Image (cartoon, coloured by chain):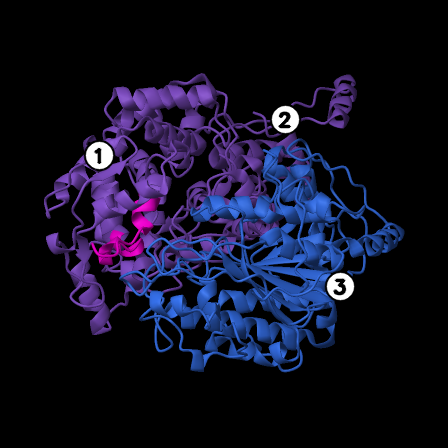
Amino acid sequence: MTVLQISPRTATKKKKKKKKAKKVAKTYPATKVLDARALLVVNRFTGGWTPGLGAEVTRSGGIDKWFAKQLSPASLPDTFYDSSATWWSSNLAPALTTIARHYAGTENVWEANAHYQAWSMIRRIGSERQVLETMANFWEHHFHVPTDGGQTGAYRQEYGRLIRRLALGKFDELLNAVSTDPAMGAFLGNATSTKSAPNENQGRELLELHTVGREAGYTEDDVKSSARILTGWRVDLWNTWVAAYNPAAHWTGPVKVLGFSHANTSSDGRAVTKAYLDYLARHPSTARRLARKLAVHFVSDAPSNGLVEHLASVYLANDTAIAPVLKALVASAEFKASAGKKTRTPEEDVIATYRALGVKITRPTTDEAAANAILWQANQIGMTPFGWPRPDGRPDVASAWTSVSRMLSSFEVHYTMSGGWWPDKGASYKKPSGWLPKASLRFDALVDHLSRSILGRPSTPFLLKVASQATGIPAAATITAKHDLVRWQMPRLLTVFLDNPLHIGR
Amino acid sequence: MTTIDCCTELSGMSRRGLLKGGITAAGVGMATSLFGGTFLQASYGATRKAGNVLVLLSLRGAADGLSLVVPHADPAYYAARPRIAIPKASLLARNDTFGLHPKLAPLLPMWQAGKIAAVHATGLPAPNRSHFSAMEELEDADPGSAARVGWINRLIGQDDYRHPLQAIGMGMSVPITALYGPQPTVTAASVDAISLAGDDQWDTADRRRRSMQTMWAGAGGAMGSGARSALSTIADFQPVAKSSKTPANGADYPSDDLGQALRAAARIIRSNVGTDVIAVDHDGGWDMHTDLGTLDWGRMVDASSQLASGLAAFFQDLGSLGDKVTVVTISEFGRRVKENANYGLDHGHGNVMFLLGAGVKGGYYGSMPSLTNSLDADLPVTTDYRSVLSEVVTKRLGASTAAVFPGFAPESVGAINV
């Protein structure tokens, strides 16, 4: 653990304590936790620790068996995804139904998008397929299409479901599906691009953001060819909204991008599109770029080149399959040594907070209900999922998510939820007395129990010190349901575990 | 050609000396920041009174400068844009060469009072058509160095004053590159966000604040320094938090994000908490590959209206305080000369920068090249954007160009009074 350092002052105090009668803090080992490596895997690949998840890992026969099962999501139930999808009417609707509902005034596309965003967070709180949800989210930020209504609004929900279906498959299939999807085309202008004046936007971002990256050294002519290859994937925006390949809009003639070239003589450019995207998916620069991005998300903000090269080679050796790369990542020494090195993004913070506090969310009946309000909580901390306005997707490093307002807004959301004050509809919080594992115990034992329940690890002398400072309660105090702590002060204690580097980090 | 003026860009040096003396007298905090390492500072000295203020307004997404300030005398402009060109007769503040987009009308009184300059054909020295890498290059503004330190961070590092409130990113959650670096800065989504939950009247023993300081005192990395900056900023930010939310002088801000960020910026300036630089973003949908549109419809009329009405309200709100506030607008690059098939424009190069407010000598500046009506034609850059910024930071904030823009020799633009 690198986050908490013992200052020299604390060290001197320790020496003094030795002379006195031993003051060993009471613990609460009956509340089970996993070992450090298992906790790390859980913190990186799920919405966050819960005691229930710990039990699930143990039942699976350990973290490696659990992870392997999670990488084959078809073997796991998907009950939560299926049921929570119906909490809003638009999440499973086809795009043309969504747009019809928009014109009928039932639900405009902006609202449909917001409901999708909320659902994407809810899924990560409750899903049985935690690793799949994590990877769906990863790719949905990689292939970023903002959820801001407008011309992408009708197709955005289908787009998200598509990415989830392919999130643990092969990258070449994912890239083909996403690049020809109406939502991406509508966002980056390809849906209305023509052969007479191809719109360069998606052709450029495909190279820069989705695949090889700028370091591959493509030229402006490559960008033009890239845009020309993509012409034809049209959407009849603001009219019938039908998405269809239109050969009359496809630019024909020789194209060349990096090492890819094609005569491109047919007005049906679907074959050249596929050949081009398959080429990009297997390009060594794409392999490195994806390897680095995965390592930045799952290991640290500055992964070593060695790890990146290793993951890139696994990716190419497995013909763009994603799961082997994740396995290699988790097996790496760099991963094992990376605890505490990542900072949760705003939405990850909110998701982990719901899980840590064991808040149960139910089908929303109002805009104020937790299932909808969760989006406002993420926004308050700094960003809703897929709310980033630009095509590069929201940043994923600590320097972006440690601003003054991010930290203070996280503290605000944590404290409000520790008290169960808001959202107070469509959610059930534990009662303060529900945090006591037995009728009477010492404060230090309670702190240990809470640390295990909320953070998935035993308490430390440092954490106990902060907990005592926050509440004014000494370690040896006896806590029962009648203690002031339970009657008044529980939010001030719970928030100590959440306003903590161990919770805001992962 | 519309080049104007000369002047000594180094004229600010003596001002800077004066300014620095004043700052030192105001008291310097226990400045012990070690960027990227363990930053153990928990409090700063008192805030000083602010001097001149720079507001950097970034138009994210690459705004089309040729629509904002139209070179109406160039026939290539009209030939290249048969559908989206703005008719000469509709332009505001027209001279022989240029005219303003009609939706900039809210700024016309300031323009006529000589308080707005438009410098055309500015930008990065070489084209960089990637939004993200161009923003990075533009805001890092130190091409010789691999260190990721933004120019505003270097600017506020020029004096002995060390306080996170010296530079604030307002209305944003993610610090922009220009702010990034070893000097502590504040980035906040709103004024209200700068308070500590639980630090309330029921916490009579000050337990909340003290326990949080204990918890974060030794925490490493960006998270640790972010939390410590946050906890130490709250008290000094109180004058802003307690200031009136109602704008002064009857100013009426638009409800969009830019309007609200500018409203917060005015509160910061009025509260005098030692802030030299405020950065605000306008994510106004400027990346207009499609539907830039005409004067009757489209994204340009919306974005330029937001821009102008927000800025007009800002200066109205500031009133006489505006005498120390200079706004500079910047965008990562401009757009192509020729329109595409979607009533839009692809990524180009040169662009226009606006300077508004204190010290500005109004009018059109910059050497405007003739446009070319071809598929790939850009507006070429004739004035490096750093020359424009240099003039502001040397003449208004008393900094040295060499320190803020290392290795760069600025040319005179002439849009700022000494």
Magenta highlight on residue A192 = yes
Q: Chain of mark 2?
A: A
Image x and y of residue B300, in percent: 41, 69
Query: Please, what is the three-letter code of the amino acid marked with disc 1?
Result: Ser
CA neighbours of label 1 inside 10 A, class few (<14), some (14 to 19), many (20+): some
- What residue sits 34% from the left and 56% below the top? A147
Res A73 quadrant in image: top left
Q: Is residue A27 left or right of residue B214?
A: left
Circle number at residue A93: none
Q: Is residue A208 left or right of residue B163?
A: left
Q: CA distance from mark 1 to mark 2?
A: 69 Å
Q: CA distance from mark 3 to mark 2?
A: 49 Å
* Residue highlighted by disc 1: A261
Image x and y of residue A500, in percent: 57, 39
Q: Is residue A213 visible?
A: yes
- What residue sits 65% from the left and 23% below the top? A24
Res A96 quadrant in image: bottom left
Q: Is A390 drawn above or below residue B215 in the view shown?
A: below
Instruction: Tell me which segment is drawn in magenta.
Output: A185-206
Q: Is B191 drawn above or below residue B146 in the view shown?
A: below
* Residue highlighted by disc 3: B272
Q: Colour of chain B?
A: blue
Image x and y of residue A459, in percent: 57, 29
Query: Please, what is the three-letter code of the amino acid marked with disc 3?
Result: Asn
Q: Are marks 1 and 2 on the same chain?
A: yes
* Residue highlighted by disc 2: A25
- What residue sits 35% from the left and 47% below the top? A144
Q: Are marks 1 and 2 in contact (CB under 8 Å)?
A: no
Q: Is residue A330 visible?
A: no
